[in-house]
Amino acid sequence: MIYPKGLCAIFKKNKHQIKYCKIIVILVFLLNPLTNFASHIVGGEMSYRCLGDFGYEISLTVYRDCYNATQGTIFDPLASIGIFDANNNLVMSLGGIDSGQLLIPKTVSDTLEIILTDPCLFPPENVCVEYMTYVDTITLPPISGGYQLVYQRCCRNAAITNIIDADTTGASIIANISEAALVNCNNSPQFSVMPPVFVCVNEPFVFDQSLIDLDGDSLVYSLCTPLDGASLFNTRPQPPLAPPYNEVTWQNPPYSLDNLLGGDPLTVDPHTGVVTANPNTVGLFLVGMCIEEYRDGELISTTRREFQYTVGYCTDLQADFKAPDVLCGDLELAFENTSLNAQEFLWKFNDSGNPNDTSTLENPSFIFSDAGNYTVMLIADPNSTCTDTFFMDVFIEQSTLEADFNYITLSCTD
């Protein structure tokens, strides 16, 4: 298979020629109606459950950027999972399939919820990650060396900061079912939480990515490099290309497994799966996680998850409003609420002459009882731990201005 990065390598001595070559290649595939080009692949993972009698439920989850996605970018109608043996050969005539691949129809996609470590911080609105889960069953009788299950797709977000040639780099999502796992009807560890969508720059980040093991096996967590797979020339191989797969190339310096986000390095506790970091750079960052499963000291399975972390600026909750600080000739004043990230409001107009001097409307109007100085208070999300308060002094002048002038009549004589 010829990849765009390989096709353009003939210009390796001229960076400008490489750039133009890549642009032309991408345009060709974008304009070709026979090419199923899809960018903004965010990541994925695969797991399995033993159903008994060599039956297995295979679960594949794929993530995509639903804010920056190119028009027409959709999840695969049929996800192709290749079944390979330990010698990297497709296993034919297996479990009622004779093509070496398990084709799983898509169901209904959903959008990931953005949850931040600090509940009083809020992400921007231009972040969206959608996911699709493909589930099916297959019979996998014991085989020497076990099985390799593979799903491939291209391509990733061009704006990814920490890898090279992201826009022409695909993904290989794999699950290994070892010979020992087959014999013992093992279940792979199951993901209990979705990956983090957004991380606030210059803020401590803590995320519990621990998995649940139905068999009580020991799990060891580590960061690992995601795998390349598929290409602009073959964005959705059916069946997937055979292993082994190249790893993605880190943009090094400054990024590597020891420095995935910048700032205080991203680390994972090998025993708990808790991820910590304090990133200092805004951008998109690819992160890979490997979970090794041990039984009686023997490695029987490895589960992988890769995901794209979006690091950006977060805002906090702020109470704020606009109003004239001086009002002449009228006792009614309209207020424009300009608060940030608030859902509920409590206004206090501090008018002792009006027993009903509060409001819970977002943009209220209030009729003051008399002229004078008033300190108006707005509480944003008054029932929240992240509440904020804003004050403004307003002056009500009830008297009005009247235009008038005097004149003198002069008499002119010859």
Image (tube, rainbow, N blue to C red):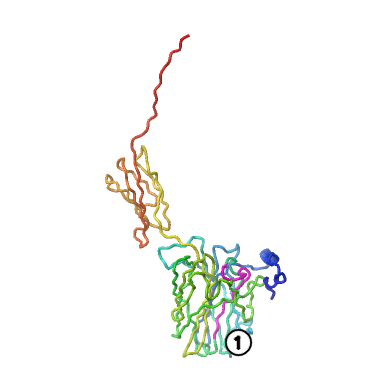
Question: Outermost residue, top direction?
Answer: 414
* 391 vs 119: above or below: above
* Pick the front one: 262 or 219: 262
Q: Residue furthest front?
A: 253
| Range drawn in magenta | 160-177
- Quick one: 258 or 387, which is closer to the camera? 258
Closer to us: 303 or 10: 10
Q: Nearer the viewer, residue 386 or 360?
A: 386
Q: Please say whether residue 166 is one of the residues in the magenta stretch.
A: yes
Q: Describe residue 233's horizontal placement relative to residue 213 as left or right.
A: right
How far from the left and from the top, in percent, is residue 350? Answer: 30, 48
Q: Is residue 143 left or right of residue 216?
A: right
Residue 313 position within the rendered picture, expressed as x and y whole percent measured from the top left: 48, 62
Q: Secondary structure at mark 1?
A: loop
x, y percent for residue 403: 39, 29
The magenta stretch spans residue 356: no
Please give the count of numbered marks on the rendered protein: 1
* Snapshot quadrant of residue 90: bottom right
The image quadrant where one finds the N terminus is bottom right
Vertical comparison of 107 with 366: above or below: below
Quarter-of-image position of residue 286 = bottom right
Q: Which residue is mark 1?
A: 86
Give coordinates of residue 302: x percent, y percent. Answer: 52, 83
| Residue name at image x 30 percent, y 42 percent | 369
Q: Residues within 10 Å of mark 1 (few under 14, many from 20)?
A: some
Q: Amino acid at mark 1?
A: Ala
* Above or below, 77 relative to 143: above
